[in-house]
Image (cartoon, rainbow, N blue to C red):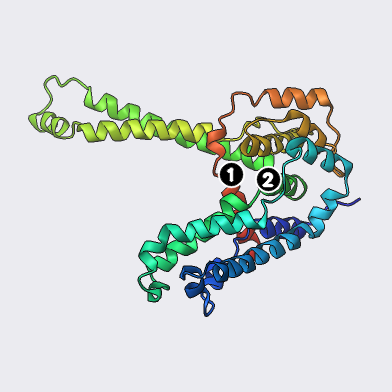
Amino acid sequence: MKHPSKKQFLYAIKAFSDPLPVEEWLNRPGVPKAILGSDEQLARRYFLELVGRYRKLLDQAYSMECVKWLGAQTAFLNAKNAALGRENRFIDDERIVQLLQEAVEARRGITRASHILFGSEASISITWRLQDVFDKQASSREMKWLILVLGALYEYFHVPKAVPHYLSTRKRIRTLVATIEKGLEAQDKLFSTPIHGEGLWFQKAVQSAEPSSAVVLAKMDVQVALKRICQGTLPIFRDDDKSNERLLIYRLWLANKLVFGKPNRHVVQMLMQLEGVASVSEAAIRKTVSGFKNELVERNYHYYSNLVAHTRSSIIGR
């Protein structure tokens, strides 16, 4: 079974991550008045319509070739069951409607006074609150996990020079960091240089340039930032015939860690058995994963949003 194309991966990730067009729905005639009015049944009917749109978009996402390719493989189904267990893919419609009603109620005191406020700041606030229900509460952990797994496989199959790129970037970053650190060290030496017999102009110049407390604090901020930058590089340290597999193991490990809060090594092992992935022994996977135990997951919180942003920009640029 041939793995999906680059385009199929990108469009599948986009399908799952695209926001529901709530603003477009809110701008329809009658919708603002209905959801802000006192007729709860009318509001509920409109909310159910919005939930229906959400379900339709998800059905389209799950029907994409890339997702069907995964779903046809025992390795993936076993991994998904091991990761998610009996967890429901979605919360039920009535619960979503309740969350939407609560989101509107939170702004009702401001917006009920005048429906004319729609299109202004009040409209933006309600749009954001309704969107937040779908992005953070209605969507399941399965969806985020699936996006991260798809992203890992996309990189593995379609970014063959990922590891050399990361290693080159790490080297360049460390060179730049070393240059900045030398500059900070030179600054310290300058301000601590004793003055013996030099001209008065030099002494005054050094004294007038002596760093203020703000500069000292700024230097500390720079040092903290430099440390974070160095920590932000991937824990892949060499380029060899298994480096792409080690990067894939890391991405799959990260998917589980970010979504479930635990590495789920057995899930990673199952996913490494997917069609097209080079064979890696369980012992090698176990050893590789053990090397991530001190990995700072906090530094990867933006990986998900960066993956989504990269996917959208790649499609737009096609």
Residue 290, horizontal then vertical, whole percent: 69, 22
Residue at coordinates 14% horizontally, 30% vertically from top-left?
A: 207
Image quadrant containing the C terminus: bottom right
> Is 260 drawn above or below residue 314 in the view shown?
above
Q: Nearer the viewer, residue 315 or 137?
A: 137
On the picture, is 68 further left or further right than 239? right
The answer to which quarter of the image holds residue 166 is top right
Residue 148, horizontal then vertical, whole percent: 68, 45
Which label is found at residue 303? 1
On the picture, is 286 further left or further right than 139? right
The answer to which quarter of the image holds residue 42 is bottom right
Q: CA distance from mark 1 to mark 2?
A: 9 Å
Can residue 71 be seen in this snapshot? yes
Q: Nearer the viewer, residue 186 or 84?
A: 84
- Which secondary structure lies at badge 1? helix
Q: Nearer the viewer, residue 265 or 192?
A: 265
On the picture, is 197 further left or further right than 103? left
On the picture, is 241 further left or further right than 14? right
Which label is found at residue 148? 2
Badge 2: residue crowd in 10 Å (few <14, some 14–19, many ≥20): many
Residue at coordinates 81% horizontally, 22% vertically from top-left?
A: 283
Can residue 310 be seen in this snapshot? no
